Structure formats: C-alpha cells, structure tokens
Image: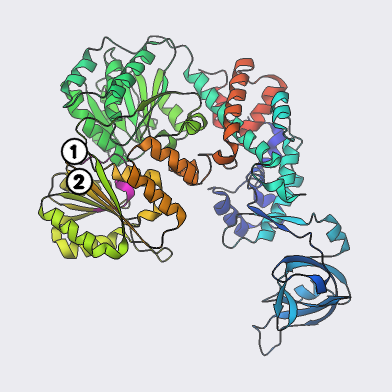
Amino acid sequence: MRPLLLNPLFAPVTSLGGVGPKQDKLFRYLLGRNETPRLVDLLLHLPASVIDRRARPKIRDAAFGTMVTLEVTVDRHRPVPARNPRAPHLVYAGDDTGDVVLTYFRAKPGYVEKLLPVGAKRYVSGTLQMFDGIPQIVHPDRVVDEAGFAQLSGIDPVYPLTEGLALGSLRRAIAQALQKLPDLPEWISPEVIRRCKFPDIAQALHRVHIPVELTDILPDGPFWSRLAFDELLAGQLALALVRARLRRPAGERNAGDGHLRKTVIDALPYALTSSQRAAAAAIADDLRQPVRMLRLLQGDVGSGKTVVALLAAAAVAEVGKQAALMAPTEILARQHIKTITPLAERAGMRVAILTGREKGKERAELLARLEAGEIDFLVGTHALIQDDVAFKSLALAVVDEQHRFGVRERLALTAKGEAVDVLVLSATPIPRTLVLTYFGDMDVSELREKPAGRQPIDTRAVPDGRLDEVIDAVGRALSAGKLVYWICPLVEESETVDLTDAQARFESLQDRFGDKVGLVHGQMRGADKDRVMAAFAAGDIGLLVATTVVEVGVDVPAATIMVIENAERFGLAQLHQLRGRIGRGSEASTCLLLYKEPLNEMSKARLKVIRETTDGFRIAEEDLKLRGEGDVLGVRQSGLPGYRIARSDVHGQLITQARDEALRIMKDNPNLAGDRGEALRCLLYLFERDEAIPLIGAG
C-alpha cells in the first residue's frame, strides 16, 4: 500500500490547471511514460540551464544580444494591418532614456492590448536586439506588473522540452505541482545529512525549480545532489531487499559430484581458459553454500560465458534439478541453444528452447515435459516467465544481459522454484562503479581471456569517400570464398537523419554481387531471419547486410570481414559488440569502420579507442569516460542506468555512500518498521522502486 501522505504527488498532471488532453500527450512523451504522468514525474524533471533576468538596465545602457529586464511605460499599439495579416503587432514603449518596440507575431486578437495596456507600467524581459536602428524585443518571455515583478526571482529555469510543449506551460505546471508537495518525512540518517550537508527534500525541489542563485541548478550543488542521493538510496535499498530475499538460507543445495561437468568439459573442442575454470569453480562453490547464489559473470565478446553457464546447469542436473536461461532476444536465445545442445547431449542432459515462436501442440508438449522433469536445461526469452510455465524443480536461473530486464522479471523467474540460485551474464564488461549501482553488492566473476585459437582482428577507419574501394575489396574477398558482414545503422530510409539504410545498401550490393547477398533486420519475422542467418552460416550467401540485430550472440566462425557503415554514429560498446561477430574462428579477421567526414571530437576519440584495443574491459572504462554509462549498458539516457537524476561523473562518490546506507538500514531495520521505515517506504514509492516492498520480511 502506498503511504496516504504521497497521494497528492500521485495525482495525474491533468488535475492541474491548464493541462488538458493535448498537454497530457506531450507530457507523456517528454517524461517517457505510457500513461498520464503524475505530479511526482514533473517534480523529478530537472532543469538543464537557467536564464538570468536580474540585469535591469535603462534602455540607453542595455547591451544588444543579451537577456534584459526593462521597466517601461506603454505608449501606443500598432495592431496587425488588415491588408497584411502576416505583419506583427507592434507595441511602442519606453523609459526616461529611450524607446523600445515589443513585437508579437500571430498574436490572438485582444491578447497584446490586455497584456500591455496603454499608459501602464510593465516589467518586460527578453533578448534585446537592434532592428532598423530601434531597440526591439521579439515575443518577450515575461511581461508582469509591479506585483508580479515582486514575486519573480530573476532567475528562470530552462527545461528539456518536446516539440509542441511551450516552456511557459511546463513551468506553470511545475509551479502548481510544487504547491501540492506534502510535508515529507526525512528518510536519510542524520549523520549522512550532516556529512554531506544535504538540505531537506522540499528545499531541494524548490531551489532546483525556483533558483535563487545561478548555481542552485548545478548537478554538483547541494540541491541536485540531495535528490541524486535520494534516487541512489532508493535503488540501493531495493537491490538490498532483493538480495536479502535471495540470500535467505536455502534448504538442500544444488551441486552434485561433478560427473556431468566432467563429461561436458571432455566434449569441448578446446581447453577451458583459466578464468573459465575459476568462474566455474566459484559457481560450484556458491551452489554448495547454505545461502542462495547471486553472482554476476561478465566477460568480453567471445570469452565463453555460455559454456560456464552450461557447467552451472550441469552441476544442478547432477542432483536431479533443473536450470533455466532467460535471454532478452530470440536471436540470442537460439544462439545459446546452438552452443549448448551438442555439449549437453554428450553429457546426457536434456535441453529445450521456449520463445514466442513455440506455439500450440508443440508448446503444450514442451511444457508437459518440463513439469514432469524431463527437461534439465530450458533456454528462452520472456516466454519463460509466463504463468503457465511450470518446472518440476527449478534450482538455477541464468539471466543474460540482465540490464535489459526489470526486478519484476528476474523475480518472476526465480519464483518458479524453491530457493533458486541466480547467475547473471553480461557481455558488456561493466566498470566497477556500475556493478555497484546496477547489481548492488553481487559476487563477480570475470572472463578476461579469449578461448585459445582466436585470431586478432585488424581494425581500420576509412572515410566514406573511399566506399568504392571498400566494395571492390569485398568483391575480392567474396571471390576467395570469405564471409562478410556489412552493418548499417537503419532498417530503411529516414527523412530525419542522413544515414545509410540496410534496405538501400542491400539493393546496391545485390546489383553488384547478385544472390551472394542476404539481408537481416529487426522488422523481419523470426523464421525469415533464421533462414537468412542459416544460409550465411552455411556459406550459401557470402555477404550479409544487417542492422545491429547481429550485435549480440550471433556466431558464424567462418565470417572474417566486417564493414560498419556510419561507424561514427555507434557507441563504443556497440562497435565492440559488432566487431565481436568476427575473429571467432582460426583465420585472421578485418573490421573496416566507414565514417562520414568531418568527425567531431567525440567520434574521433571513439574510433581511436576501438582501433587501439580489443579488450572489452578497457573499452567499457573508456566509454564511461567519454559519454556516461547510459550507453555502456545500452540504455537510452546518458545518466546512470535506470536513474533520471543521478550522474556517474558527478555523483560517483554518492553511489558508495548510498550503498553503505542501504546495507546499514538492512542490518538495523530489515523490515522497515517504525517512523524511519515508513519514511523509507515513501522514498521507494517516490522513485518507483516499490517493486521491492512486497519482499520486506518475505521469502
């Protein structure tokens, strides 16, 4: 139950004056919500900059091209002439040092006369320009009388907007929302408030939205930092509650004598790397402990995470239990099953796949076998957490690319068994600060080496003016029997961005190379994608034009060449993932990064890093430095993943403090009891971490 105190903040924005259905639509888009946003969403939408209106010169002394506030008396109006309706409405005004013209285009009839009555004194704020030798302000931002001016701080926040939503409308809505802010309890401990010199939350929200000083809206200032800490604490507390639930003492443990694992290892065509052996041993050890496992296995592209996950599944199969692996896309799920099946079958393990594509009788038979315990290891997508999927004895949940799943989905999978152990895989090496933010205090195993026999990849950057040379080189490679990827950023032509689309590139390359060329993209049906991928893997087509659908998990060891078009538009982690599709066999590989000139500094830096190294851990650290970890984790915004206010470059030191505070709360008050507990529940609801509340005292 949400604390009643918070109800005013969870009222819809449409309950505010001046916010109708049209605005509702715009606010949904701006605030990234599918349903009508609430007042709390507005209050957590923070300004990007400010306008300083405190300069109040006389007209004679005002500097052109600057934001000024003038105290003027209105002399006369020149309304829009009937013969020229596109002309502006002009208002002539002045002070004792000179005159200014206030210009309004397409104003509603009567609006300007009412705003600026002749003879009245008004305070007018806007950018002063010179036009025909006369000072002019076009569409002043603010026009107020004496009483209105007394209420202005002189500093106005400027917010990120969406097309069609005026800054004034957003400001008015936020001002109304601030008035409805209830008296919130303090959830941060007194020592943290003292150490960090934090204001209370009401003061933080007021000063960020109604700044008194220009510095009030800086992310590293006390007001924004307070809100960032609140958000981080909510995230860390939710993770701590999940972890406490998962860490509850478990009954029978889930590792056998090792006979199946030995069979799997013997069936491998190569020896395990030392880090694969270490990770498998750490997992087996976790599976024997009296508490449930919660481990993150992160490894670079092609470092062999799937095999380690299979060894974990084999360990639980040794004691007659089941394992499940949930992947975010069907391509990735099918890639895992392709790697797992031959090895598992050698060990006598029964494996199956469940995605949205398995339907009807086939699906029903599979679910019956699963419930009867006739499947040891089930690989799939979100389809695994549907209500009718029942395991006989699920003991291990493997979650791949975990940052693409929410808390709810992870818990839904573990809820399908008793005391289920959790292994999380990430193909994006994650810098340590992010591991803390995103996974809490998880145990971490890293796969640092590539499997033996992998060849280095020669990476080169080529300007797109040399496209014809690249196509000629691809032709020579195809004649020599090589397999080539050609990656494009878009599926089809776009009017808004000047980028190459896969459809057009496919057609132009098909004109040149005929039926040796295939195409895959995200808008194709799964079966069609699989058919083209299978033809490429078999060598029936030699050149695969694709979008980033091949970024993760596609494994064609014979492919040795990749061309990435508009490479300057991709993030470092994405370039690294794409490049990881080649260099998987025993032949040397080449990656060509085609870029459009001129390059900006950020793109230059990215292409330089990707040319210099294939070490995903170094690339992840560099990516974090270059553009914030929203992109390191493939998450839209350039802030912390899943966070709106906290930023790693500014609030990095607060992450550790929020984690320590969350662990202290779990030690002292694990059931969030009493006044402090009630305050912390408010915090979890405000920052949408209330998924964790049902876990309090549960399990």
Residue 555 belongs to the span the image colors magenta: yes
Q: From the viewer's perspective, is residue 128 above or below residue 39?
A: below
Identify the residue at the far bottom of this view: 83
Res. 551 in view:
no
Q: Position of residue 307 (x, y in %)?
A: 26, 26
310 with respect to 59 (left or right): left
- Say whether residue 674 is magenta: no
The boundaries of the magenta stretch are 545-556
Percent x, y of residue 393: 34, 17
Q: Count residues near mark 1 (Cα–Cα under 10 Å), then give few for <14, some for 14-19, many for 20+.
A: some
Front one among 150 and 592: 592
Name which of mark 2 and mark 1 comes first in the sequence: 2
Residue 500 falls left or right of residue 542: right
Closer to the camera in the image, 212 or 333? 212
x, y percent for residue 172:
72, 55
Residue pictured at 16% horizontal, 37% vertical: 586
Q: Which mark is residue 560?
A: 2
Q: Is residue 317 above or below residue 448?
A: above
Secondary structure of residue under mark 1: loop
For marks 2 and 1, give the CA distance: 8 Å
Could you tell me if the residues under marks 2 and 1 are in contact, i.e. CB atoms within 8 Å? yes
Quarter of image, res 164? bottom right
Residue type of the residue flagged with mark 1: Gly
Q: Is residue 110 shown to the viewer in this render?
A: yes
Q: Quadrant of residue 335?
A: top left
Q: Quadrant of the N terminus?
A: top right
Question: Where residue 626 sits in the image (x, y, percent)?
Answer: 47, 46
> From the viewer's perspective, is residue 87 above or below residue 348?
below
- Mark 1 sits on what residue? 585
Q: Nearer the viewer, residue 95 or 157?
A: 95
- Secondary structure of residue under mark 2: strand
